[in-house]
Structure formats: C-alpha cells, structure tokens
Amino acid sequence: MSAITFEEIMFTIMSATQDTFKNYLSVDIFAGKVERKVDPVDSDVVGIVGVAGDRVGYIILAAESTAAVTIAKELLMIDEPDEESIRDAIGELTNNIAGVFKTKYHEQYGNVALGLPLIVSGMLRTVAEGTSQDQSGGSSSMNVQCKGVTIPFMSLDGKFALRVMVYM
C-alpha cells in the first residue's frame, strides 16, 4: 500500500467540493489560487470534519453569512433558513466533501475514518508547533495546530464564495 501525497489530497478535496456543489445545489464553483499556509479563519459559519486513521487532520469549510444563507436556502429548499438550518446545511456539505475523500482513499490507502461535523462561528487561530497558549482572556476562539492549505471557491455569479481548508 503506497502513501497518499498531499497533492492527491488537495486535488480530491477540490474535486469533491466542486462535485458536491454541482450535485447538491446545481451550481458550478471554481477554485482560486491555493494558499500553502495556515491563516486564522474568521467566518460566520465554519464546518469541521476530523479525519482519522492512517492520515489524520481536518477538512474545514468556511462561509460568510450571505453565502451560508444562500447555501441553506438552495440545499434545504426553504425561503428563510434559521440558524439551525444554516448550520445543518454547512455541516452536510462539509461532511459530504470529507466523505468523498474517505470513499476514494479508504481501500487504496488504508484506514480512513471521519468524525461528526462540528459547526462553529468566529475566529479559528493557528498555534505554532511547540508553543503554549494562554487559556485566560475569555475570547471566543478555537486554536488549531496543524499545517495545511486554503482553497478559495467562488461561483461565476459571485453568489457563492467560500473557503475549504485541508489540514493533514
């Protein structure tokens, strides 16, 4: 069994994101320039699915409120989604994208398991490896320690703009 490269992971996630939007929402989205760095994520709705097994990490989908509301309207076929519906829609899309990764690589590369989607909002900050974090201060943020990439996506009409982060 050969090891999966990070480039293969990125290509799979990019394809899975595009296919998910096409299949679930009948929308073509296009990937922008991949950023090979981990920046803080400040977004209105963030879906996180953990990946475990022979390869460990996270797949994260971040959307601003306008895009998240539009996604929920289209996906759930409702006129005015409430906060729970918006969280459900983002969680479903994040889970589907991660599911494509799992399906593609489970048999070929070994064990791949997914966690349940976690939906948060606000700031996700990175923590440099080997540093400690002061837990006081009461800010509403989560620290993520890992390396990865950010892939921006947008529809041609600008109706959908989001970012998918891959940390593995």
Image: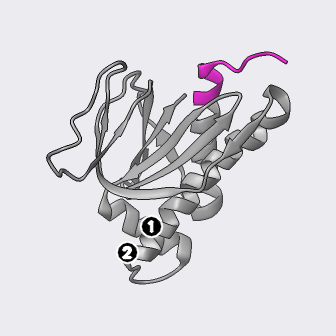
Which residue is at a point 31% across and 64% down the rendered structure image? 66
Residue on which the image places disc 2: 83
Which residue is at a point 37% across and 60% down the rendered structure image? 67
Q: Residues within 10 Å of mark 1 (few under 14, many from 20)?
A: many
Task: Tell me residue 103's x, y (percent).
Answer: 77, 43
| Magenta highlight range | 1-10
Which residue is at a point 54% across and 51% down the rendered structure image? 28
- Are the residues flagged by discs 1 and 2 in contact, CB closer than 8 Å? yes
Mark 1 to mark 2 CA distance (whole Å): 6 Å
In the displayed structure image, the side of residue 25 where residue 108 appears, left or right: right
Task: Tell me residue 165's x, y (percent).
Answer: 45, 37
Q: Residues within 10 Å of mark 2 (few under 14, many from 20)?
A: some
Question: Among all residues in the image, which is located at the extreme bottom?
Answer: 79
Residue on which the image places disc 1: 87
Nearest the viewer among 81 and 57 is 57
Task: Tell me residue 111's x, y (percent).
Answer: 78, 34
